[in-house]
Image (spheres, grey):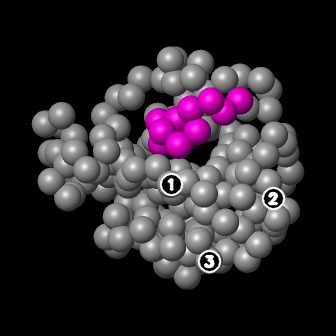
Amino acid sequence: MLSYIAIGSNQNKPIQQAEQAIQALKALPNTQLLKCSSLYCSRPMGPQDQPDYINAVVELDTQLSALHLLDELQKIEQSQGRIRKETRWGPRTLDLDIILYADQSINSDRLTIPHYGMKTRAFVLYPLFEIAPHIKLPDATQLSQLIALCDKKELIKTSDLDHSCSADQLNKK
């Protein structure tokens, strides 16, 4: 099953966290990493008194069920120091979200696919568009339609920054 995973980090060397997560995704059982977007820098959602985020999206071909994949992603998050808190959108070492799983729509207590916020989040849409521009969501929405409606805002490829991701860098672009 083709699956797309969003990667996010803003704690404990976020670029290194994202790169380490990509390596861990390559090692998942019965799974092959097919594509990986560039790394992007973005302002945090929610509270602004936290560091900027590093984001990416990867394309996987997996034989794992969606819930088994979720379990594996949570193991990776925990191995990289993720501590789940009650507060949403707070700082974190690593966040791995299944944004799409084949052409399936899933709505359970543990998992919602497509990811509930993917249609409006530049830090998901632009990296996804980089690696899969012709993708269609389960509701038949074309990714290109979502990109046309989503302001890139202050999303910047890390290759365009001075090897850091900070508000000062974002304000200069």
The x, y position of residue 79, in whole percent, is: 55, 82
Q: Quadrant for the C terminus, please.
A: top left
Amino acid carrying label 1: it is Cys
Amino acid carrying label 3: it is Ala
Taking 172 as reference, is 158 above or below it?
below
Amino acid carrying label 2: it is Ala
Horizontal side of 130 relative to 101 (left or right) equals left
Residue at point 71% right, 68% down? 31
Under circle 2, the secondary element is: helix
Instruction: Estimate the spatial distance between the alpha carbons at disc 3 and disc 2, rounded to whole Å.
Output: 17 Å
Q: Is residue 146 visible?
A: yes
Q: Nearer the viewer, residue 39 or 113?
A: 39
Task: Judge whether residue 152 is colored magenta.
Answer: no
Horizontal side of 18 relative to 82 (left or right) equals left
Residue named by callout 3: 27
Q: Nearer the viewer, mark 2 or mark 1?
A: 1
Residue 70, quarter of the rendered image? bottom right
Residue at point 31% right, 70% down? 13
The x, y position of residue 154, in whole percent, is: 31, 34
Residue 134, quarter of the rendered image? top right
Magenta residues span 125-136
Residue 45, quarter of the rendered image? top left
The x, y position of residue 53, in whole percent, is: 37, 53
Residue named by callout 1: 36
Horizontal side of 98 relative to 108 (left or right) equals left
Under circle 3, the secondary element is: loop
Residue named by callout 2: 66
Q: Is residue 46 visible?
A: no
